[in-house]
Image (cartoon, helix red, strand yellow):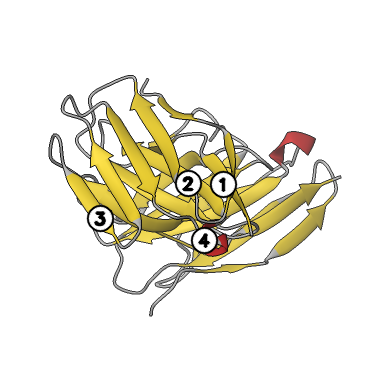
Amino acid sequence: GQQVMQIPQYQHVQEGEDFTTYCNSSTTLSNIQWYKQRPGGHPVFLIQLVKSGEVKKQKRLTFQFGEAKKNSSLHITATQTTDVGTYFCAGYSNSGYALNFGKGTSLLVTP
Amino acid sequence: EPEVTQTPSHQVTQMGQEVILRCVPISNHLYFYWYRQILGQKVEFLVSFYNNEISEKSEIFDDQFSVERPDGSNFTLKIRSTKLEDSAMYFCASSVIAGSGNTIYFGEGSWLTVV
């Protein structure tokens, strides 16, 4: 079945440094979604990418979808302590009902 | 903003006991889901539910698990005979549509501890 992999598993940065997490799927994705989970919280939808090579920005966050639609990245510029949390990418199963999450990248930002 | 609500927020149960986790999805949503997250691990799909029947389930969702929509607002997950390895955060979620283009909204979770 489809597997979604993410690296790195953990990242510790100083406030103001940049951060990137990478997501790779074993199969071509129709779209990819990104979620953020704060410590002790629930996953919150950030964005969805659909088109090959698509790039979307949300303030300091930049999301990319690979040309082959098998990989994606999330880049945060000038991290802040409010960015702390685990960032998950997720892709839908072929049926469209199951969202398969990657293992996530836990970001720790030190002031 | 509408949200998915879950009860209880935390439940401790003895191994072998039955547990029912309750959820109220967002009112105009048609698709309902249960996911679980073992401490420190990824979010795992359990089951999706549409039009009063299961539309997809994962390998985790074995005969010990069942889901039900007993009335027009609640969506429940029942674990018949809990095991220690069922200890996890269980997230209910809902969406307007399914598949591509779909945004899933998660509840805050029910933390289940089996002792």
Badge 3 and badge 2 in a common chain = yes
Disc 1 or 2, which lies upstream in sequence?
2
Indicate which label's residue lies in the foreground, 2 or 4.
4
Labels 4, 1: one chain: yes
Q: Chain of mark 1?
A: A
For mark 1, does the 10 Å Cα neighbourhood hold few (<14), some (14 to 19), or many (20 or more) residues? Answer: many
Counting residues from the N terminus, which is met first, the one under dot 2 or under dot 4?
Answer: 4
Q: CA distance from mark 4 to mark 3?
A: 17 Å
**Is the residue at mark 1 from the same chain as the one at mark 2?**
yes
Which numbered circle lies on residue A87?
2
Report which residue position mark 1 lands on: A107
Q: Marks 2 and 1: in contact by CB < 8 Å?
A: yes
Amino acid, disc 1:
Leu
> Mark 4 belongs to which subunit?
A
When the figure is inspected, residue A45 is found, relative to residue A89, above or below; the finding is below
Chain ID, mark 2: A
Q: Residue at x 51, y 63 (%)?
A: B107
Instruction: Give the answer, above or below, for where B112 lies relative to B5.
Output: above
Q: Residues within 10 Å of mark 4 (few under 14, many from 20)?
A: some
Residue hosting label 3 = A57
Indicate which disc, 1 or 3, sits on the residue closer to the N terminus: 3
